[in-house]
Amino acid sequence: SFVLAQPPSVSVAPGKTARITCGGDNIGNKHVHWYQQRPGQAPVLVISYDDDRPSGIPERFSGSNSENTATLTISRVEAGDEADYYCQVWYSSAEGVFGGGTKLTVL
Amino acid sequence: EVQLVESGGGLVQPGESLRLSCAASGFTFSAYALSWVRQAPGQGLEWVSTISGSGGSTYSPDSVKGRFTISRDNSKNTVYLQLNSLRAEDTAIYYCAKQSGGIIVPFDFWGQGTLVTVSS
């Protein structure tokens, strides 16, 4: 199996930059996708293929992926960004896996 | 507008079965793989099953293989998840998710989910 490790929580003040990491063995060789899940809502894709932003996602959201760590970066954080964030990859021929999720708190 | 509407959840006893449905609209149904992803209460997301656009290929983790079966009816724009031999640990919200193309691609749209509770 392939394990993705995320910090359980990240806190950031409004207007600052939040960075959420996703660690995995040579994850830089895989495509990483990121999902935002606000309380009581379904997940929403915010970054695909490491650093691609789907239509409608603010430019404040960006991603990177190298070696053993992928990172979701949220610039100029707003109160509405408070949510759980999950990284996800496909491995082997078609096995899907999510990270454990990171709760972003806006102070 | 893409819409995915799940149904079929409910309260069942351990060992019983349930069939979930996901009715889709707003896109060319047969052109896209679809998946089920679940979330236990207060927990993270867990991939459960994926089916190709034609329905000819299916994938699932060992944790549900042999108990859960994904299928689709392209004439009805509906994907199903048959849940057999249910256990307490299968209690979760089950989300239907559309993939952006083939199999190993991101989940670009999600339904609102249907709750399955397994309890005696």
Image (spheres, helix red, strand yellow):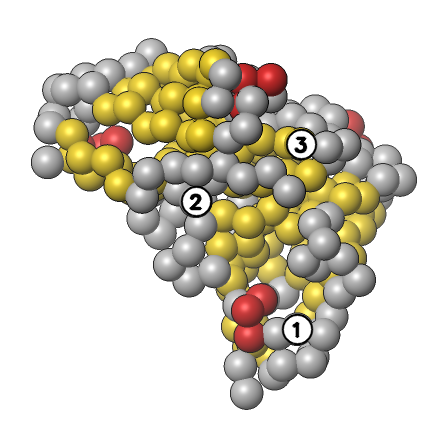
Label drawn at residue B103: none
Please say if the residues under marks 1 and 2 sit with CB atoms less than 8 Å apart: no
Q: Do labels 1 and 3 share a chain?
A: no
Q: Mark 2 points at which residue?
A: A100
Q: What is the CA distance from the residue labelled 1 to the residue labelled 3?
A: 27 Å
Q: Mark 1 points at which residue?
A: B86
The answer to whether residue B107 is left or right of residue A38 is: right
State the image quarter where residue A80 is shown: top left
Q: Do labels 2 and 3 share a chain?
A: yes
Q: Are marks 1 and 2 on the same chain?
A: no
Residue furthest to the right in view is B56
Q: What is the CA distance from the residue labelled 1 to the residue labelled 2?
A: 24 Å
Question: What chain does badge 3 belong to?
Answer: A
Residue type at the position of mark 1: Leu
For the residue pair A28 and B87, the one nearer the viewer reads as: A28
Residue type at the position of mark 2: Gly
Q: Is mark 1 on a helix, strand or loop?
A: loop
Q: Mark 3 points at which residue?
A: A91
Pinpoint residue A96: horizontal percent, then vertical percent. 63, 39
Question: What chain does badge 1 belong to?
Answer: B
State the image quarter where residue A91 is shown: top right
For the residue pair B17 and A50, the one nearer the viewer reads as: A50
Depicted B62 relative to depicted A52: above or below: below
Q: Can residue A53 be seen in this view?
A: no
Depicted B76 relative to depicted B84: above or below: above
Residue type at the position of mark 3: Tyr
Residue furthest to the bottom in view is B120
